[in-house]
Image (spheres, rainbow, N blue to C red):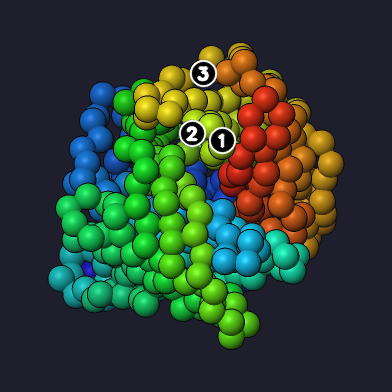
Amino acid sequence: MKTIIWPLALICTLYGAGIGANDLGAILGGGSDHFKKALPGQPINLPADHGAHPDYRSEWWYLTGNLKDEQGRGYGMQWTLFRQGIEQEITSENPWLTPQLWLAQFAITDVSKGSHQQDERTSRQGPGLAGASGGEYWLKEWVLTSQGESLFPATLKVRSKAGDLDVKVSAAKPAVLQGKAGYSEKSPGNASFYYSYPRLTISGTLTLDGETRHVSGEGWFDHEWSSSVLAEWQSGWDWFSLQFDDGRELMLFRLRTKSGRTEPENRYGILIERDGSSRVLSPDSIVLTPGKTWRGPKGQPYPIEWQLEAADLKLVIKARQPNQAMTGRFDYWEGAVLVSGDAKGVGYLEMTGY
């Protein structure tokens, strides 16, 4: 006999339509449940930790890129695989009752046309419907497949209403452990395990509106897992992954404090050198100033231009186009950006909780 407890908010968010961006914090917050907590001193072991960690509540594999085709037209691409554990007790061996829900999202920004197309899939884990193990990270036919024991090189194949992508992805630099040896604290008592591949090479084909074009460019990959990311007094985050033309990368984020609260804003940044070495920046040295905003589909005031000071750099970050809002199970802005100022390059920006 099995006992199953499915939280209503989670089911509605992943399978229904009524819960928006403000509830993402509740899903990524903590709770009194059976999930493990991310604690300091637990090492990340690669390649084993590329796979899923079902003992933790939430997990995501995230790949973005700035691409060009043979005519010089520019594109942004995002593929995300999201796993959410269900608060339940279960004793059955039935694979359909595995307490894991999965969401995959895919988006293509066509800069030359000013368009942003997106698609998403949801699934129970079930017998072979979704998962992350054995060098495959998939939800049904959307699959990232490693070519060996390491995560990269890999192939990514997506067939969707937004377009079709069939590319090879290789790592130009090794993985970087974020935070303290992979332990990324978001607020007191809330943290994740987190690593990144800061520079990938991407090449293959992209099909949009029936036209197949050869594309190539550079990308970024994140893998993160946790049972409590946001504290109840935090409203959301602004996250930047920037790749400079001189061969360096800069990743940083800020976790915003809700209006009326006195807790300090959490900031984190890391600068990765050409040779792959890296240094974590002092939070006090990171200054993010939002500029021009663009109203999302529900009126969200997303800042699409930023002034950034970090690591002795003064940078201007601008969206390659304003319309890059994601409007599926979660409402957020995720899009390709251009970098100018003391360094030039491209990157991706994610904004939640607006």
Residue shown at 32%/26% (left/top)? 181
Q: What residue type is labelled 1?
A: Phe
Position above or below: 249 against 80: above
Q: Which amino acid does label 3 sit on?
A: Leu
In the image, 60 versus 32, the foreground residue is: 60
**Which secondary structure lies at badge 1?**
strand
The quarter of the image holding the N terminus is: bottom left
Q: Name the residue under label 3.
A: 281
2 and 1 marks in contact (CB < 8 Å): yes
In the image, 325 versus 354, the foreground residue is: 325
> Which comes sooner in the sequence, label 1 or label 3?
1
Between the C-alphas of marks 3 and 2, the distance is 18 Å
Position above or below: 100 against 166: above
Q: Mark 2 points at which residue?
A: 247
Q: Name the residue under label 1.
A: 244
Res. 278 image quadrant = top left
Q: What residue type is labelled 2?
A: Gly
